[in-house]
Image (cartoon, grey):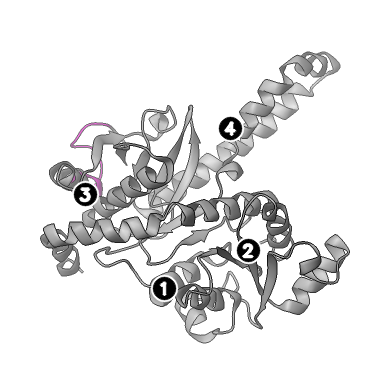
Amino acid sequence: MKILLDAMGGDNAPDANIKGAVKAINQIESEVILIGNENIINSRIRELFGKDNIKEISDRLSIKHTTETIEMEDIPTQAIKRKKDSSMVVGFNMLKNGEGDVFVSAGNSGALLTGATLLVGRIKGIDRPALAGILPAYKSRLLLIDSGSNTNCKPINLLQFAQMATIYLNSTFGTERPKIGLLNIGTEENKGNDLTKESYKLLKEKSKELNINFIGNIEGRDAFLGNIDAIVTDGFTGNVFLKAVEGIGKFVKISLSESLKKNIVSTIATIPALPGIKRFAKTVDYKEYGGALFLGVKKPVVKAHGSSDEKLFEFTIKQAEQFVNNSTVEKMIDEFEKINSKNEDIFDEAVNAE
């Protein structure tokens, strides 16, 4: 297997990307191809590892040279069309042409979503692909879809997000009939705005025939109690929810650390509890869960956090290998082919609503 890594994408590129790949390479069986300016990457390898060639670190690491980079401030559609030798566009074309099995990038989110849709292509029957991020939950994990790709959605989109979440959780984690909830301001059926009300009706109506285990509305405060496997929402709400959760995690970590080090007594008292504190910190650390999967496109694409450090790149690369090994995309394509043949009216509704 070949993992294609955008070495120039992200706030901490290329150092974090390179270090993450080096850390991950001995924990995976795949090759990792770093896509970006070869001169810059080699210069950083000499500085960071004292090696003249990336092959000296591992024979499963290599570089694909490119001359351009899509910046965070670039307009997505224009960047994809004009910067044809950028690390992102080259990566997508390699993925499309079978020169790699999965593409990982922490670059411009809009460009990533545009490139994945235009260059790789949507799975037939899916109106809008979506970012699916994994978050920690009590004694389990929580899938959040959409976590930022579609800021304006229709009820058909949220229905399809629920379908994709069901297929992904079953194929990757073996979750039988994963419990799917609709993020809302209350649990009652009549709560929410027009989108959530109409989405609730559609999910309730179509869940049985589409094999979705829809359990109703879920409030944000109940999301992490371990009673649900996936939350469905529009990308705007999902991204706000995601970043709020990440912020709370950082707040808890900083506050806890300061409290434990406040004085000599609290510091000494902390020593017996350190193993438990470390386990807790690992459980709530979103970096342990890798990036967000871009579900709904024909080939595996993983969006790493824009501020990814080497640890998050390490886990995202490992996650990408698992994503491919579980054949999630192939299973999704097969499942939607079956669904489309039986439920063409549902997708027609989405097309006609444009």
Lower position in the chain sequence, tag 2 or tag 3:
2
| Dot 3 amino acid type | Asp
For mark 2, what is the residue? 31
Distance from the alpha carbon under mark 3 to that under mark 4: 36 Å
Which residue lies at the image location 27% right of the left edge and 63% below the top edge? 126
Instruction: Tell me the quarter of the picture where residue 62 sits.
Output: bottom right
Mark 2 burial class by Cα count in 10 Å: few <14, some 14-19, many 20+: some
Q: Which is nearer the eye, 157 or 263? A: 157
Is residue 225 covered in magenta? no
Label 1 secondary element: helix
Question: Dot 4, how many residues are within 10 Å of its Cα: few (below 14), some (14-19), or many (20+)?
Answer: some
Q: Observer-nearest residue: 222 or 294?
A: 294
The amino acid at mark 2 is Glu
Amino acid of disc 4:
Thr
Q: Calculate the distance from the C-alpha at mark 1 to the C-alpha at mark 2.
A: 21 Å
Q: In which quarter of the image is residue 48?
A: bottom right
Report the mark closest to the observer, 1 or 2.
Answer: 2
The image quarter containing residue 40 is bottom right
**Mark 2 vs mark 4, CA separation in Å:** 29 Å
Position of 86 with respect to 80 (left or right) is right
Q: Identify the magenta region.
A: 187-198
Asked if residue 130 shows in the view, the reply is no
Identify the element where label 3 is drawn. Answer: helix
Q: Where is residue 332 in the image (x, y as percent from the top left)?
A: 32, 57
Q: Name the residue under label 4.
A: 283
Which badge, 1 or 2, is on the more N-terminal residue?
Answer: 2
Earlier-in-chain disc, 2 versus 4: 2
Instruction: Report if the CB atoms under discs 4 and 1 are less than 8 Å apart.
Output: no
Q: Distance between the residues labelled 4 and 1?
A: 34 Å
The residue sitting at 34% across, 52% down in the picture is 234
